[in-house]
Image (tube, rainbow, N blue to C red):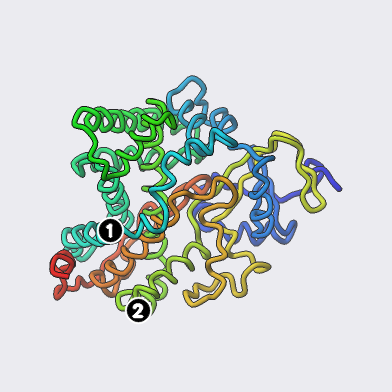
Amino acid sequence: MQSVTDLALPHLPIEEPAFAADPMPYIEAARRQHPWLAKCNGGYVVHGYQAIKDLLYMDDRLSASSDDIIEIMGAKGTRWGKFIQEMVLAKSGPEHARLRGSIAAAFTPRNVNRYRPLMQEVVSRLLDEWAPKGTFNFAEFASYFPITVLCRIIGASPAAIPNLRHALETLGLAYSMDRSLMPELEAAYNQAWGFADQLVIERQTRGSSGEDLLDVMIAAKAAGQLNEQELRDMLVFLFVAGFDTSKNALTLIMHSMLRHPEHWVRCAEDQVFCDKVVEEQFRHTATTSIPRTLAEDVSYGDIRFPTGSMLIFAVPMSGRDPTAFSDPMMFQPERISANRHMAFGRGMHMCLGQHLARAQIGEGVHLMAQRITKPRLVGEVTWRRFPGVWGISSLPIAFEPNAHLKASAVHANS
């Protein structure tokens, strides 16, 4: 058994733009020195599939890296820093169960399926607006889909979307480890919290209809599951979590489909195949790295990690581990093992909204493929920072709009 501090591990520059643009050459080089572990600034990167899976299940020995992130970002004493410390992802044990339990029933597969017609309506109307252009930044287009669905589910006015969208884009960089972003993060949190506060006040003044997610959350507050601050912070958390990952996953799917146009054609025809494409994308390139800090000494394999070590679980690359998947670099929607991915995490913090994400991305891809035909890249692809929520920030495409199908009209008559 060796201490991790005594190992000659490779270093991964995960905060560098070059790494974000193409991580795999770095990961493959690192594997030649150690099969699943590397160093990074401030901690260690766990990139092997099995190691990520095993270590993430050690919930009782892991804590959210909120204190480390606050230190790295220089966020002590800020409202954003307090949010990072108090949100549901930062909690464990009874506190975590209480916060998660306040909204869990709304995200069951049965409840999510009730929202499918809403998802179809939202993406159809967006396509009516955007598809006739014939060219746009797909990442920008995709960003309006999850936020509009969330507003409708929660019961918020879509009029807030333009301003809220910018705040959520910024808050998605929370774990980027770029200290220079701190003023923007603080301003974005204040804006998002103000939106949540106004939403709650208006609902409490108007009265509850008991029909949407905000009513469920206000009822949880009345039952003592949430206090006033937690109610508003939970709203902010839901918007950030539901917006960024879904938008990035959709954009990554389009990026993959540009290289596999035959799959895109089939997506327009076959909803079941769309769902397979979504799962394979989660396997091939997921969006979120997970930071955790060890609450006690941990031994794994032949390595001992001391208390306080920060581990970055490189989930986006875990599905390309050749010891876990055959031909891992190939994008194969019919792959039987695709759903073994860890895009939604593992353990107590496994993504609560995973069924919602799967449903809206699958519904979105199916309708987008019908309206956006023969897409092609027409500009430079730019990438977000790798730590935290990773993905494509700009994906300029041109395409042939399907002039014979106006999706909103189809769904209005179906």
> Can you identify the residue that label 1 sits on?
119
Q: Is residue 219 above or below residue 288?
A: above
The residue nearer to you, when weighing 106 against 42, is 106
Q: Of callouts 1 and 2, which one flags the residue occurring earlier in the amino acid sequence?
A: 1
Q: Which mark is residue 266?
A: 2
In front of the other: 357 or 224: 224
Instruction: From the viewer's side, name the closer residue of 151 and 207.
Output: 207
Where residue 243 sits: x, y (%)?
A: 36, 48
Instruction: Tell me if mark 2 has few (under 14), some (14-19) or many (20+) residues whose alpha carbon lies within 10 angstroms of its own.
Output: some
Image quadrant in which you'd find residue 68: top right
* Numbered tag placed on residue 384 in the rendering: none
Q: Position of residue 261 (x, y in %)?
A: 37, 76
Q: The C terminus appears in which quarter of the rendering?
A: bottom left
Q: Position of residue 109 (x, y in %)?
A: 41, 58
At a point 38% along the width and 48% down the height, the residue shown is 106
Q: Residue at x 36, y 65 (%)?
A: 362
Q: Amino acid at mark 1?
A: Met
